[in-house]
Image: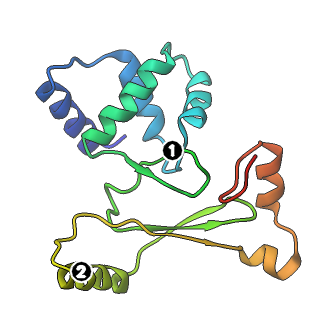
Amino acid sequence: MTSEIKERLNTFIRAQGLRQTPQRDAIVDVIFSSDEHFTPDELWERLRGTDARTSRATLYRTLSLLSEAGLLQEIDLGDGQTTYDPNFLDKPAHNHLVCVDCGKVVEFEDNHMEVLNDCVTRRLGFRPVRQSLRIEACCDQIRSTGQCSNHIEARLHGKRFPGKKR
């Protein structure tokens, strides 16, 4: 976890009249030890692999706190679950490409989209605050070979796919 994240979180916690706890610190460390998107259940599984002694309630409160502090962003990847993105602090205007077959998520940035976003919102009398774009598509591997190792891996781990009921 970067010192900037820790400093911003500690400042936010103090402003809210809360105290720093070892359980919250453990959750934050696990979240920011990777740049992968995650659901609360996936985070819970990652936490279980550590020595952290925390509850699901603390996990959900910490996720809410991190979102309120602007350190974590809730995103919709089209699978009906709340997914969290720990990467937007460094790249606030990134978007997501989601494979509808294997669930693979690719982040991307494009200056043209930022310009379009700005033009559209100004024309309609708004000021852009944030943007989020999700494109659902089939990955090249599925299209070219009909098979995808990500698809097989995702099925083995029981991951859900955008637009498909489990």
**The one of 97 and 28 positioned closer to us in this rendering:** 97
What residue does disc 2 label? 118
Residue 16 locus on image (x, y percent): 15, 26
Count of number-bearing discs: 2
What residue does disc 1 label? 82
Q: Which callout, 1 or 2, points at the residue further toward the start of the chain? A: 1
* Residue that appears at 50% across and 55% down: 76
Secondary structure found at label 2: helix
64 relative to 126, above or below: above
Dividing the picture into quadrants, the one containing residue 5 is top left
Dividing the picture into quadrants, the one containing residue 78 is bottom right
**The one of 99 and 9 positioned closer to us in this rendering:** 99
Residue 10 locus on image (x, y percent): 20, 30
Q: Is residue 147 left or right of residue 101?
A: right
**Is the N terminus in the top left, top right, bottom left or bottom right quadrant?**
top left
Secondary structure found at label 1: loop
Amino acid found under the numbered disc labelled 2 = Asp
**Is the C-beta separation of discs 1 and 2 under 8 Å?**
no
Disc 2: CA contacts within 10 A as few (<14), some (14-19) or many (>=20): some
Residue 136 locus on image (x, y percent): 61, 70
140 relative to 165, above or below: below
| Outermost residue toward the front in this view | 124
**The one of 145 and 2 positioned closer to us in this rendering:** 145
* Residue that appears at 47% across and 40% down: 33
* Residue that appears at 71% across and 74% down: 138
Dividing the picture into quadrants, the one containing residue 89 is bottom left
Q: Is residue 138 left or right of residue 109?
A: right
Using the numbered discs, state the Cα–Cα distance from disc 1 to disc 2 in whole angstroms: 27 Å
Amino acid found under the numbered disc labelled 1 = Thr
Q: Which mark is residue 156?
A: none
| Outermost residue toward the top in this view | 53
31 relative to 160, above or below: above
